[in-house]
Amino acid sequence: MTTATPVQAFDNAGAATSAGHAAVARLVDLSREFGPVLSFAIYDKLGDVECEWRRFEQTADCTAFQTFDWLDAWQRHVGQHTGVRPVIVVGAFAGGETAFILPLAISKKHGARRLSWLGQEQCDYNAPLLAPYFLQRVSPDRFLAAWQELRGRLQRDPKFRHDWVELEKMPQTVGDQVNPFSLLPVTANASGAHLTQLGDNWEKFYYAKRSSATRRRDRAKRRHMSEYGEVRFVTAADADDARRTLETLLRQKHRAFARRGIPDSLARPGLREFFLDLASNPNIRDRFHISRVEIGETCVAANFGIVFGDCYYHVLASYDDDTPASQYGPGALHLRELLAHAIDLGLRRFDFTIGDEPYKYEWSDTSVTLYDHCSAATWRGWPQRFMSTGRRRLKRFIKQTPLIWNQVTRVRATAGALLNPKETQRHGARADAPSRRTADGDPT
């Protein structure tokens, strides 16, 4: 279904701009010379807008998680089997050129209909695709008025009616622009994200990031790993190789989650097929990078990354804690190889994506604040809004309070040991080995 509506988003719409976004407010004056009209069309099938979406993402400000291939694969393998209805909004300027694409969705959650980003739980960043200089052509007040008009249109259509809105993990900026959705009432997400600017030479980058003592330890660990066989960094050569590597990654992640007492988020129905599709589809293989570190014939670390624009997105990583060489940090070695690979590709940024693991702080030079927005649309949505807001505030408090977070981590690990004794015993045997175990940990 497609509907088109002109939105009169005038400067006096009356929506307040958040005090934390004064930089956006300063763009208001720049927008006054442009016409006041935005129009939009609403689609509930991704295929109906595929051509324009693919064309627009080549020049729009967006992240890798808003590309058509990523969200189309998620909807086919996960969304359509769980009752998710896409709500794809394509906005246009008065002259007809595309202004934005909003990949939204309606789903049932806790007995109420939720409006969220499409694939929200699986995307490390959720945001619109924006035309360059969007906020110089559309003032903050105009955008907020357009958002309210869109919400009204959705509520008047039974297919898109919803009880509450939950928009999570929204970066403050999209490309070089402030994310207009950060103008909504927002709270900080429980986790941040981290990235680093890459240079044009791996050795210079490595020397700038790591001390001479750390570099010596890295070399020593690699020498110890080589005692168990030849150490190789391997990029999957074809679709079958990519599938095998990703299967290994998923098994390693499952064991790691079990040991730590964490539910396996990758065990959700359809997610395995989703990642395998992306990894092995020959039409998009150049966008997804699947690699591993081998020692002898054993895959000791694996990763799934995305190459989009000038950025490498580090999405999934694992390492094998059951091999003797694991005590020397194969995951850390793999990360160094990936950074060097990204530099060799001529990329300018390496995005560690969401999560505040210590190793990310060691390499990153930029931290990204992520925001959540939650609001009720009907009386059914009010309980959901309160529960969602309370859950996210509690989660952030726990994760941002080291003493409490350390206790939670220990309790989960204890629970994991009780529920998965075989995995824990195998891991314990490795940890108790009388050898020089890495102290800085591996990224997983």
Image: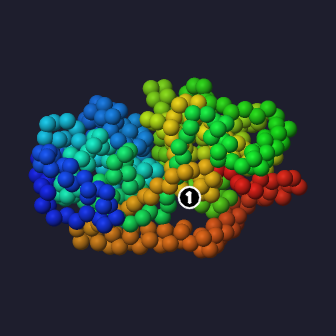
Quadrant in the picture for residue 262: bottom right
Q: Residue at x 47, y 72 (%)?
A: 394
Residue 357 shows in the view: yes
Q: Is residue 24 left or right of residue 271?
A: left
Q: Is residue 147 above or below residue 418?
A: above
Q: Is residue 310 left or right of residue 203?
A: left
Q: Is residue 99 above or below residue 388?
A: above
Quadrant in the picture for residue 355: bottom right
- Residue 238: percent from left, percent from top: 57, 25
Residue nearest the viewer, comparing 154 with 440: 440
Q: Residue at x 26, y 49 (%)?
A: 135
Residue 89 shows in the view: no
- Residue 398: percent from left, percent from top: 54, 71
Tag 1: amino acid = Asp
- Residue 132: percent from left, percent from top: 29, 40
Quarter in which the N terminus is drawn: top left
Per the image, the residue denoted by label 1 is 356
* Numbered circles on residues, count: 1
Residue nearest the viewer, comparing 325 with 10: 10
Q: Is residue 66 left or right of residue 443?
A: left
Quadrant in the picture for residue 188: bottom left
